[in-house]
Image (cartoon, helix red, strand yellow):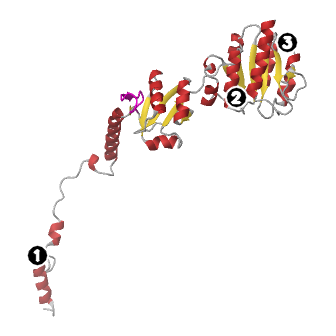
């Protein structure tokens, strides 16, 4: 027997009896079972679990949406007003009118709208109460939203926002079909102030114009401000956008219209014209630059309105109203 063999055998016999001293049986605990494998939908990182979570979230959002859309009118009649669009988090499409005064004025003028958005727990004053009543009268959906959502759309909203419908423009052809002899059409060459646009539309409707034309680019469009300034005339008078005013002028001439330009620098005064009873297209220049060069060249006649030397110029809408009044009076006498 080699030296040391006896000690090695003893060591072998000791290892067969159980765990080495000092382990406390920890290895035995590690080998204990952990139960059955969880289902796929219960494992957080499994695709099935993610689908289950998304389905639960969708179901809960539908439930909460059913309870949204209520606005308590507080100091008015105390009734709850329900929205036809109770979905939460939807940003109103198109142009918006924000602020208590602006919203109320737009509703009073029956500006075509899609939705009234009101902050939850808003302090209801006379303006808000009237806005809610007008919206209900017009059949307009009323939606309640968190204050943060309303302020995120417009920081100066004062808790109330009105969403405006996109304006439905007419066409030059439709305006010509509407025109009665002798035709009267107003065209705008670069008028950029929507309030001037609205006031011009109002004057055009008042003095029998068949419609108003404007360019699509570098000009005011039918915003809520323009609609309000028109005092509802925009709902009664065709308004068209054209891509090229010069080509539209050529088309009007082929239809037999006499093209009359308004420009404060012209030496030809409005009182001297003899063609008021003829079919006319009156072209109004922009607030600052007046008529564009090409537009001026295509006019059959360019006239001005005499004013005091102490006044630099007339507002575009005021000049248009004066010219239309003069033509209307001349036609009545004729």
Q: For the magenta stretch, what is the residue range?
A: 74-86
Q: Residue furthest bottom?
A: 3
The numbered dot on residue 275 is 3
Q: Residues within 10 Å of mark 3 (few under 14, many from 20)?
A: some
The numbered dot on residue 18 is 1
Separation of residues labelled 3 and 2 (CA atoms): 26 Å
Sequence-first tag of 2 and 1:
1
Above-or-below relation of 257 to 216: above
Separation of residues labelled 1 and 3 (CA atoms): 123 Å
Separation of residues labelled 2 and 1 (CA atoms): 100 Å
Q: Nearer the viewer, mark 2 or mark 1?
A: 2
Sequence-first tag of 3 and 2:
2
Give the camera-side residue of 185 and 58. Answer: 185
Is 272 part of what is drawn in magenta? no
Give the camera-side residue of 161 and 177. Answer: 161
Q: Residue furthest top?
A: 334
Above-or-below relation of 83 to 16: above
Q: How many marks?
A: 3
In the picture of the structure, the residue carrying the numbered disc 2 is: 196
Residue drawn at x 54%, y 33% as measured from the top left: 101
């Amino acid at each position: 027997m080699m030296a040391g063999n006896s000690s090695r055998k003893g060591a072998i016999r000791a290892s067969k009896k159980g765990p080495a001293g000092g382990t406390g049986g920890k290895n035995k605990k590690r080998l204990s079972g952990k139960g059955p494998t969880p289902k796929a939908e219960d494992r957080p990182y499994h695709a099935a679990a993610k689908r289950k979570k998304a389905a639960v979230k969708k179901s809960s959002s539908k439930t909460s949406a059913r309870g949204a859309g209520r606005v308590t009118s507080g100091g008015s009649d105390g009734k709850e007003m329900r929205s036809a669009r109770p979905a939460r988090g939807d940003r109103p499409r198109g142009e918006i009118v924000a602020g208590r005064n602006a919203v109320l004025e737009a509703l009073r003028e029956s500006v075509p709208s899609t939705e009234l958005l009101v902050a939850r727990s808003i302090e209801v004053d006379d303006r808000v109460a009237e806005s809610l009543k007008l919206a209900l009268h017009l059949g307009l959906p009323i939606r309640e939203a968190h204050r943060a959502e309303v302020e995120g759309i417009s920081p100066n909203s004062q808790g109330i926002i009105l969403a405006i419908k996109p304006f439905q423009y007419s066409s030059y052809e439709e305006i010509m079909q509407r025109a009665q002899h002798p035709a009267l059409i107003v065209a705008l060459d670069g008028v950029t102030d929507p309030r001037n646009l609205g006031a011009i539309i109002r004057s055009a409707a008042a003095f029998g114009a068949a419609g108003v034309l404007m360019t699509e680019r570098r000009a005011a469009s039918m915003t809520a401000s323009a609609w309000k300034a028109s005092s509802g005339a925009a709902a009664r008078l065709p308004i068209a956008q054209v891509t090229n005013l010069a080509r539209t002028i050529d088309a009007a001439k082929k239809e037999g219209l006499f093209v009359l330009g308004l420009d404060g620098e012209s030496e030809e005064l409005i009182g001297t014209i003899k063609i008021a009873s003829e079919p006319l297209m009156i072209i109004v220049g922009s607030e600052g630059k007046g008529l564009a060069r090409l537009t001026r060249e295509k006019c059959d006649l360019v006239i001005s309105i005499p004013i005091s030397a102490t006044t630099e110029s007339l507002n575009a809408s005021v000049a248009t109203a004066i010219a239309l009044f003069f033509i209307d009076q001349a036609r009545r006498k004729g």
